[in-house]
Each structure stands twice: as structure tokens, then as C-alpha cells.
Amino acid sequence: MVRLLSAFIMIFKSLCRHAGIGANSYLLKTKTAKVVLDAGMHPKHEGSEAIPHYEFLQPGTADSIIITHSHLDHVGTLPVFLQNQAQAKVFLTPETAELASAMLHNSVNVMQSKRIEHGIAEYPLFEHRELDDIEDGFETRNIERPFDLDPAGSIRATFHDAGHILGSVGVTIEAEGKKIFYTGDVNFEHSTLQKGALFPEGTVDALIVETTRGEQARDPKYDRTTEEDEFAAAIKGVIERKGSVLIPVFAMGKTQEVLGMIHRFKKEGLIPKHTPVYIGGLSTKMTQVYDRFSTTSRRHLPNFRFLKDMELEAGSKKRKGPIPFHPGCIYALSSGMMSEKTVSNNFARQGVLENAKHGLFFVGYADPETPGGKIRIAKQGDSIVLDPAFPPVTLNCETRIFDFSGHSTREAILNFILKVAPKKTFLVHGDDGAVDWFRQQIKQHLPRTEVIIPEPGVEYEI
Ligand SMILES: [Zn+2]
Ligand SMILES: [Zn+2]
């Protein structure tokens, strides 16, 4: 059979340097256009190891880059990418534009201190003034509005709400008569603030899909409201015995979800109405962005502004010095994994962990190698190193783990895959076991779908 001349093959290539959940970046190539999906920074590596393989792309050749959302594993090295691809247009939602700017500026500060503390000479990878120029060039696009990704209009994209954090999207890409869908990070279930993803369910030629929770079966008895109510009861218990609650959270996304829950708990009398709630400096900045989009974004609690409508003790430039530690308060502080030198780590080390009246409640993922991960698997009375620069501390406080993940269950993602019945599926953003579960399920339920776990730098036809 002779292939028709018009049927140029599209190419998919992973630019990720490491497998698993890391620095996400993928290339789509047509006869005339090159488009990159995401520009992540690896959370567990430093320096050049944390940067995707941008050298796989000839300088000055990318037409555009799409940023699906503002978590650093998707946007953390955008300025590095643009250093050799200054002509590339950056497409993202207005919400992601604002959150990403704040995240990247914070990242410069983090890299500057890592340069001093750990002697990483290549840090910072970019500077504040570089970011100002990049932000000026952002091409913001709203969901469900198709737009061109190249000057010739040969490749088009449409954003769809991914339900993961404010501004997060999955994207449909159409070119060469083919339809490709990239999920980014997705949550199909409603959260407290975030509404569940709204993705198109028509068939696609190729699907690039996240597999984060592929190793976790959802407890069939799980119910979000019940989980929230148990969280409220646990907080109430601590407050009543005059302890304080520490909730390690990511500044963006999880902080606002937790605030949304606390707002409901207070309104419904599940916890005392006047319990002071503290959030940290970067969280305050992120919450301001959430508040600015309270009327225009697709979300629950429309018009509700955290900083105005809740009595929050918010860390800001106005209040100098550390956040005070008092009994009977709720502290939703970053980082979510309690990394060394962060506020949640300091609070745990300087009072919370050793005192039985306090509570340390996890509401999201923590890598097993991080201080948060170590506490999650520890037993009462264990002594834990939270920061190697300080002596270990004994775990005496109440610890609980709640499931409020911003990622879809594997069952919901599989359900989506079955609906869009792709000819090819690229499994990304998951550990080996997670990817394996999806591979087996797809083989079983969609035997004609080709399943690909993309190797970095290898070109796959679409
Ligand atoms: Zn994410
Ligand atoms: Zn991610």
C-alpha cells in the first residue's frame, strides 16, 4: 500500500529527563509546526538534572508552548526553555499566568538560597527581571475557545477545565486531520473549591494522559463529604483540648481547598466559629490571586473571597517576623511535604510534634523521603529527623492522613480513556507501578489501543 502524500505523520517526543512524576515537557511536531507542552522543573533533582531535554530542540524553532497549569513540575523551567526559544508564543489561561508568575518569582528566591546553602553554582537558572519580560509576552486564552498555535494556522488548540487547581487545563490539539488530547494534571471529582474537570468525550487519535494515582485503588467506601466531616471532627478534638492543628499544605491549590473546608466547618458549627486560622506568606500571595478570580473562574463558592470574607491571620509583608505559635489555632502552612527550612517543618520541629495535645493532619501527598513522608509512616514515640541541622524530635502529637487529592482516581481516569478510545495512548506523569496498572487495564479493555510509555528523545508517530 502506498501512503497518501497528504497524510504527514505527526510526531510525539518526550523531553522529560527522568521517568515518573518530574519535569514534564513534551514536543509535538507536524510538517510545519513545533509545539511544546509544559516546561516543568523536577522537584527532586537540582540544577541541570531538574531541566527537561530542551537541547533536543534546535534553538529558535518552536512555534509555541502551552502551559497547562502553574505547578512547578509543569512551569518551573519555562524561562530556561525561552532562553533558546525566545520566538515561541506562551499560551496559558489568565489564572495560570498570574499564579505561574508568583510561583516563578518565588522559585528565583528559593534557587538563590540554594546557591548559598548548597553551593549550586548554576542557580538561579533565571532572574526576576527575565520573568518580567516573559510575563509581558504571555498569550492568555480562556477555556473552550479554540486558537492557533502557529502563524500559518496549521495547528489549533482548545483549553478545557482540568479541575486540578485554579486555571488548570487539559488541551485538545488538532492538526493534519488528527485530534490529540493532553490531560495535564486532572481531577474529575468536585473538590471544595475546584469543580471537577470538564473534558470533551469524543474519540481521539492520541491521548497523553497523567497516571499519578495508578497504584492507589480508591476505597469504595470513600466519600468526600464524610472525609471532610472526619477532618472537621479531628480539628475540633484538638481545639477542645487546647492544642493547635498544623496542616502542611502547598501554597497554591491545597491551601485554598483547606480554607474552603474550614469556612464550611465554621459556618456549620463543626468547629468553633472563632478559631484563628493562619496561612503563610507565599500562600497569602496565591490566595490573593484566587480571590481576584473569584467571580470569573469556574469554581464552587463563587464571589467568595478568602482574605476578605474569612477572618484569616495571613502572613504578609505588613506583618514582620515569624508567625506566632498559640494554642487553639489552625495553621495551614507550606510546604506540603514539610521540607527542611519551610514554615511547616519549623512549626513541627519547634513544638507541634512533641506535644500530645497538638494535631498534625496531612491532606495531600508527601514523598516518602521528605520529612512529611517520614512522619506519615512513623509510630508514636519514634524519634524523627525533621532537619539534619537540628536534633531529632519525638512524635507524640496526634497524626492523621486525609484524602483530598487534587488528582483523579485511577478509576475515573480509566473511565475517561475508555470514552475517548484513543488509537494511541502515551502514559506519563506516574511511577512505574502506576503506569503499569494503566497499561494492563487499557490492554484488557481497549485491546486495539496502542499503549506507549514514552522514552525521552524517542520519536513516536501519531
Ligand atoms: Zn499539578
Ligand atoms: Zn504535575
Image (cartoon, helix red, strand yellow):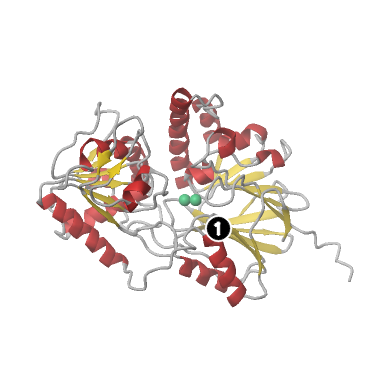
Q: Position of residue 146 (x, y in %)?
A: 59, 56
The quarter in which the N terminus is drawn is bottom right
The location of residue 30, given as percent across then percent down, is 74, 53
Asked if residue 306 can be seen in this view, the reply is yes
- Residue 34: where, in percent of width, then height? 70, 47
Left or right, 139 with reference to 423:
left
The answer to whether residue 240 is left or right of residue 81 is left
In the figure, residue 47 lies in which quadrant?
top right
41 or 28, nearer to the observer: 41
Q: Is residue 276 left or right of residue 104?
A: left
Closer to us: 345 or 61: 345
Residue 288's x, y, as percent? 34, 41
The amino acid type of the residue labelled 1 equals Asp
Q: Residue at x 20, y 42 (%)?
A: 354
Rendered position, 343 above or below 291: above
Q: Which residue is tagged 1?
A: 432
Residues packed near mark 1 inside 10 Å, few (<14), some (14 to 19) or many (20 plus): some
Is residue 336 left or right of 230 when viewed as pictured? Answer: right
